Image: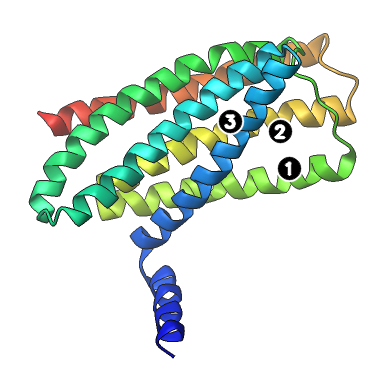
Amino acid sequence: MKSDKGTDGVFVRLKCDFAFRKFVFAAGSFVITLAFTAYNLFLGIAYNAVFNLGISVYYALLLCGRAFVGIFEIKYKRAGLSEEQKSVKRKKLFLATGILLLIIALALVGPISLMVRQQKYVNFTEIPAISMAAYTVYKISSAIAGFVKTKKLKHLSLEILQSFNFVDALVSVLSLQYVLIMTFGDGIAGAMFTLCAISGFAVWAVIVITSIAVLAKAIKNFR
């Protein structure tokens, strides 16, 4: 009975506590990102695939960012710090991850360039491609909704996680565009090449702007 009550308590907290729910989902995202990192690193090494090596670096940096936040929250919760003390520590974490976000943006230059130049191998049929489209729509809508809610809470660790989620969702949109073109079209050529180049740069620019905005806010808070 005690175990059941404990389980019920977790579900109730997941439903009612937005911050707790986001940290639990972040743990799931960490596992998924770890799997993507290992998978792309394997493909890069096994098949000498430059794109997969480049994207594995991106996933590894994303993994580090999420790990930093998780370790921070666990460490300082166990240390029994007051909310004021945690706030000071979070400002330092916010600054460090703001710098990391900018590094992630720079690390994406290679993979995005290779994608536009059709140097990413794609072997999708229609059903997996459409499923990927549905999942990407969910990721981007969830990231935007979470970003709005997080700003109201003014919880720096959650803001960091949402920034990572937002960047991850944007990269998924770009990857989805490429997969759909390669699956349903005749590849990237002519006007389609121009479209992919423009959209690729546009998405990357949004990621850079997001990174700079987060870093600027982090520096302001730290001062």
Label ID, residue 37: 3
Q: Quadrant of residue 91?
A: top left
**89 versus 52 height, above or below:** below
Residue wearing tag 2: 176
The reply to whether residue 196 is in sight is no
Q: Is residue 77 left or right of residue 56?
A: left
- Residue 35 in percent (x, y) is at 61, 38
Residue in view at x 15 percent, y 46 percent: 87
112, 11: nearer the viewer: 11
Callout 1 crowding tier (Cα within 10 Å): few <14, some 14–19, many ≥20? some
First-in-chain label (2 vs 3): 3
Query: Quadrant of the rendered structure where residue 37 is?
Result: top right
Q: Amino acid at mark 2?
A: Leu
Disc 1, SS: helix
Q: Earlier in the sequence, mark 1 or mark 3?
A: 3
Q: CA distance from mark 2 to mark 1?
A: 7 Å
**Residue 153: % across, % down:** 27, 55
Residue occupying image coordinates x 48% and y 46%: 144
Whole-number angstrom distance, CA of label 2 to CA of label 3: 18 Å
Q: Amino acid at mark 3?
A: Thr
Cβ–Cβ under 8 Å for marks 1 and 3: no
Rounded to the nearest angstrom, the CA distance separating label 1 from label 3 is 18 Å
* Comes first in the chain, label 2 or label 1: 1
Q: Nearer the viewer, mark 2 or mark 3?
A: 3
Q: Circle 3 — which element? A: helix
Quadrant holding the C terminus: top left
- Where is residue 11 drawn, in percent x and y? 45, 74
Residue that badge 1 annotates: 132
Q: Is residue 65 above or below residue 16?
A: above
